[in-house]
Amino acid sequence: MRSPILDYLDTVIEQTAHVDSGALADYIPELAAADPTRVAVALCTVNGTVYASGDTDHHFSIQSMSKPFAYALAIEDYGLESVLDHVGVEPSGDTFNELSLDPETGKPRNPMINAGAITTHALLKTEHGSSVERMLNLFSKLSDRRIEIDESVATSELGTGDRNLGLAHLLRATGALTQEPRTAVEGYIRQCAASVTVRDLALMAATLANSGVQPHTQERVFRRDTTRQVLSVMASCGMYDAAGDWLSTVGIPAKSGVAGGIIGVLPGQIGVAAFSPRLDMHGNSARGVDMMQKLSQDLGLHLMEAG
Ligand code: GLN
């Protein structure tokens, strides 16, 4: 019998069909060529059951939804204290590609904005494989299938990556960045070009909801305290300069990506993923935000509301 949850996810798609505001990301030519009508939503329980509706097999690049996972890996590599020496945890209130540095320390304000994410990517240990290979292996573990890079997206963004390169040079000048700027930006851009579906993302989010244990394989991918740190930073900084609005309306830790994906995590319960390519003024998927608001209201996901 078809699950009522699948019927419900179908209605989330139907009831947000009117949302056609926003625009495709045009600073990465390959993303500007996306089909704006594609839409999908998925959720995964901490027991590993995945429910998905819409264009569930459509692949798109993970983009900034990779940032919480790179942050988690850096914390596992060095411990939180050392990572905090390089990247802060304060919401910046700025757009994702701003050079938001703490004026006193010269460190990027948080690991969810580009400045912090480039710095975080460059921190990853490389004795056992390049940082990009390590990120792909991590995404593969989290989604329980092999994840690869969309080379056309990577090439496209590398060709127009001047802003990120500019950020990296400034980060190098302040001492925050430990790598050569071009190496750091190329690695970061490849990390962002990993190709995923909403099912993959729901499983990745569910691993965070499950305190770092992948629900299908039962592998502990992140320590419990690492997961708590990552979710805290997602809650305060994951939606950039819309983080406050998001926390009050949707109420769960989340991260968006400029290809149109959003992941959300209800700790101990579920991971959620939505996809629709048109972005609002904050660089978050416009229809994705609507879908998430609906899910939060209908399923009572808001963390600040007693159950
Ligand atoms: N790769 C993108 C960039 O650096 C990621 C941005 C995003 O998804 N918000 O611009």
Image (spheres, rainbow, N blue to C red):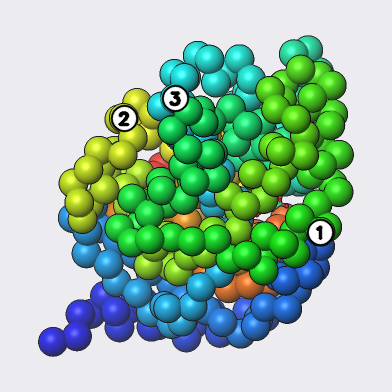
**Tag of residue 199:** none
The mark that comes first in sequence, 3 or 1, is 3
Reply above or below: 25 against 40: above
Give the residue at x 64% y 44%: 187
Front one among 295 and 1: 1
Front position among marks 2 and 1: 1
Closer to us: 263 or 169: 169
For the residues bearing labels 3 and 2, Cβ distance under 8 angstroms: no
Q: Residues within 10 Å of mark 1 (few under 14, many from 20)?
A: few
Residue 216 quadrant = bottom left
Q: Is residue 11 above or below residue 255?
A: below
| Residue drawn at 55 percent across, 21 percent down | 83
The tag earlier along the polypeptide, 2 or 1, is: 1
Name the residue carrying label 2.
223
Res 23 visible: no
Three-letter residue code for mark 2: Arg
Q: Dot 2: within a 10 Å radius of its alpha carbon, few (fewer than 14), some, or many (20 or more) residues?
A: some
Q: Position of residue 205 (x, y in %)?
A: 38, 52
Cα separation, mark 3 vs mark 2, equals: 11 Å
**Distance (Cα) linking label 2 and label 1:** 37 Å
Q: Label 2, secondary structure: give it.
A: loop
How far across and how far down the image is residue 5, in percent? 26, 75
Residue linked to disc 1: 159
User: Upstream in the sequence, badge 3 or badge 2?
Assistant: 3
Amino acid marked by disc 1: Gly
Q: Would residue 7 be found to the left or right of residue 87 on screen?
A: left
Nearer the camera: disc 3 or disc 2 = 3
Q: Amino acid at mark 3?
A: Asp
| Residue 226: percent from left, percent from top | 39, 29
Write down the residue under mark 3.
Answer: 77
Q: Quadrant of residue 182?
A: top right
**Structural distance between the alpha carbons of marks 3 and 1:** 31 Å
